[in-house]
Image (cartoon, helix red, strand yellow):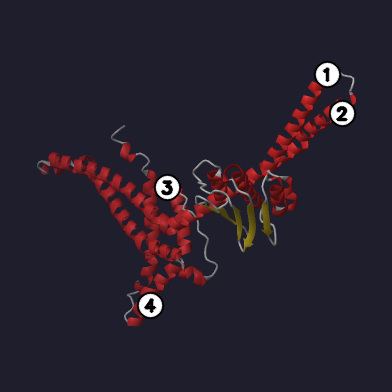
């Protein structure tokens, strides 16, 4: 029913507040213990009675946090994320996270527990007021008759009790939400730490996707090279043998065989270019130096390649560097009207620097649909940086920095 909707599922926040009050009473009892026998009288003993229990509570903050996590999970189905504890006591005490916990257990938690206790009192008082007619009719008749106008007064009490029950229900849920909002940033990682953790997870996930895509390209390259390409080579060889040996065939048949032979060789070349574009085998077998030298040899203009690497970078970084150079040289051939190009690959600590320059007409624009926009996205997929300098009249210089382990 609509009237009962505010009370739906109220047992969880009620149990949550009650357990919080009991937990805070236990901590307040620890603070009150030194004062129970009559309390200290000397200045030093007073300071000790105040500071020692507070220090004990601060030391017990990690344990109290673990208990609070169980409470939130049990009553609100909320799992407060754990945070890696500092490795040393000094690091723990000096960490902001530790003092956020202490702030919750010594200040925020007790204040919310006090508000929760007042809310429970409101529940009790409202329940008594709402059921006033039950209490009245439990009295002897002569007592009721002696109270003139008790029915009207009871109606006011009952109405106030019902309103108090609705108010207590709202306060209970509001305090539970308030406690949750106060506990999450204090007992768990802060918002900045959560974002940093999420960024790390996304970065790791993206690295996995990049590695998986690179592995898939390698698989496709192997399947095409060892399967379809070999079949086409065999077909071209057979057609070549047929053309060489079957000299007595009619001219039309020889013409068909000759055309099929040319088409087979063209298909082999196209498939070879496709395989090389997916992931050249020489890159995996011999590294960047050999792969880039192969690109330079196939280019229709002079390309000087200089690769200075003490060790090979990760396969994904190698693949990105190769495709950067491949796409950049393709743009030089198509658009630059250059007489030559230069490729330099060097490693400086954790950075792989790739520079491709030409002496063409310049005017290249990453947003101009020349493939540079896609190239920049590929570089960004491994957290690299891409920049291009191409004034009108040239020269054009493409600079890429790729992160790699030092």
Looking at the rendered image, the disc whose residue lies closer to the viewer, 4 or 1, is: 1
Q: Nearer the viewer, residue 6 or 306?
A: 306
Q: CA distance from mark 2 to mark 4?
A: 103 Å
Looking at the rendered image, the disc whose residue lies closer to the viewer, 4 or 3, is: 3
Disc 1 marks which residue? 251
Numbered tag placed on residue 48 in the rendering: 4
Looking at the rendered image, the disc whose residue lies closer to the viewer, 2 or 4, is: 2
Disc 3 marks which residue? 76
Mark 4: few, some, or many residues within 10 Å (few <14, many ≥20)? some
Pick whichever of labels 3 and 2 is earlier in the sequence. 3
Looking at the rendered image, the disc whose residue lies closer to the viewer, 3 or 1, is: 1
Classify the position of the C terminus by image quarter.
bottom right
Mark 2: few, some, or many residues within 10 Å (few <14, many ≥20)? few
| Quadrant assignment, res 371 | top right
Horizontally, residue 395 falls left or right of residue 186, namely right
Pick whichever of labels 3 and 1 is earlier in the sequence. 3
Pick whichever of labels 2 and 4 is earlier in the sequence. 4
Q: CA distance from mark 1 to mark 2?
A: 16 Å
Q: Nearer the viewer, residue 9 or 129?
A: 9
Measuring from the top left, give residue 169's x and y in whole percent: 30, 44
Q: CA distance from mark 3 to mark 1?
A: 88 Å
Disc 2 marks which residue? 241
Measuring from the top left, give residue 276's x and y in whole percent: 70, 42
Classify the position of the N terminus by image quarter.
top left
Identity of the residue drawn at 44% across and 57% down: 192
Identity of the residue drawn at 39% across and 49% down: 15
- List the single residue furthest toward the left: 148
């Amino acid at each position: 029913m609509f009237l009962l909707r505010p009370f739906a599922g109220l047992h969880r926040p009620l149990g949550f507040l009650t357990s919080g009050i009991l937990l805070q009473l236990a901590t307040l009892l620890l603070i009150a213990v030194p004062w129970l026998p009559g309390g200290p009288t000397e200045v030093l003993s007073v300071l000790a009675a105040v500071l020692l229990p507070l220090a004990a509570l601060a030391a017990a903050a990690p344990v109290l946090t673990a208990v609070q996590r169980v409470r939130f999970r049990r009553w609100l189905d909320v799992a407060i994320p754990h945070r890696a504890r500092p490795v040393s006591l000094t690091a723990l005490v000096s960490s902001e996270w530790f003092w956020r916990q202490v702030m919750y257990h010594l200040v925020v938690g007790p204040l919310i527990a006090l508000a929760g206790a007042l809310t429970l009192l409101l529940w009790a008082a409202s329940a008594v007021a709402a059921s006033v007619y039950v209490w009245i009719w439990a009295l002897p008749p002569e007592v009721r008759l002696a109270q003139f106008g008790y029915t009207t007064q009871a109606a006011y009490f009952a109405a106030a009790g019902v309103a108090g029950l609705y108010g207590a229900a709202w306060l209970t849920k509001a305090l539970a939400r308030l406690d949750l909002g106060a506990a999450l940033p204090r007992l768990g990682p802060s918002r900045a730490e959560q974002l940093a953790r999420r960024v790390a997870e996304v970065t790791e996930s993206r690295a996995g996707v990049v590695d998986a895509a690179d592995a898939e390209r390698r698989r496709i390259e192997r399947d095409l090279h060892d399967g379809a390409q070999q079949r086409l080579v065999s077909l071209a060889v057979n057609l070549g043998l047929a053309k060489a040996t079957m000299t007595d065939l009619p001219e039309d048949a020889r013409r068909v065989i000759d055309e099929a032979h040319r088409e087979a060789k063209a298909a082999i070349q196209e498939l070879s270019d496709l395989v090389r574009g997916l992931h050249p085998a020489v890159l995996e077998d011999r590294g960047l130096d050999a792969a880039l030298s192969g690109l330079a040899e196939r280019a229709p203009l002079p390309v000087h390649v200089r690769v200075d690497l003490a060790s090979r970078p990760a396969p994904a970084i190698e693949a990105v560097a190769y495709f950067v150079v491949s796409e950049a040289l393709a743009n030089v051939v198509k658009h630059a009207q250059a007489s030559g190009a230069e490729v330099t690959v060097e490693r400086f600590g954790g950075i792989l620097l790739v520079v491709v320059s030409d002496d063409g007409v310049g005017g290249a624009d990453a947003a101009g649909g020349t493939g540079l926009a896609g190239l920049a996205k590929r570089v960004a997929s491994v957290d690299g940086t891409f920049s291009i300098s191409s004034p009108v009249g040239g020269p054009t210089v493409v600079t890429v920095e790729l992160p790699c382990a030092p």
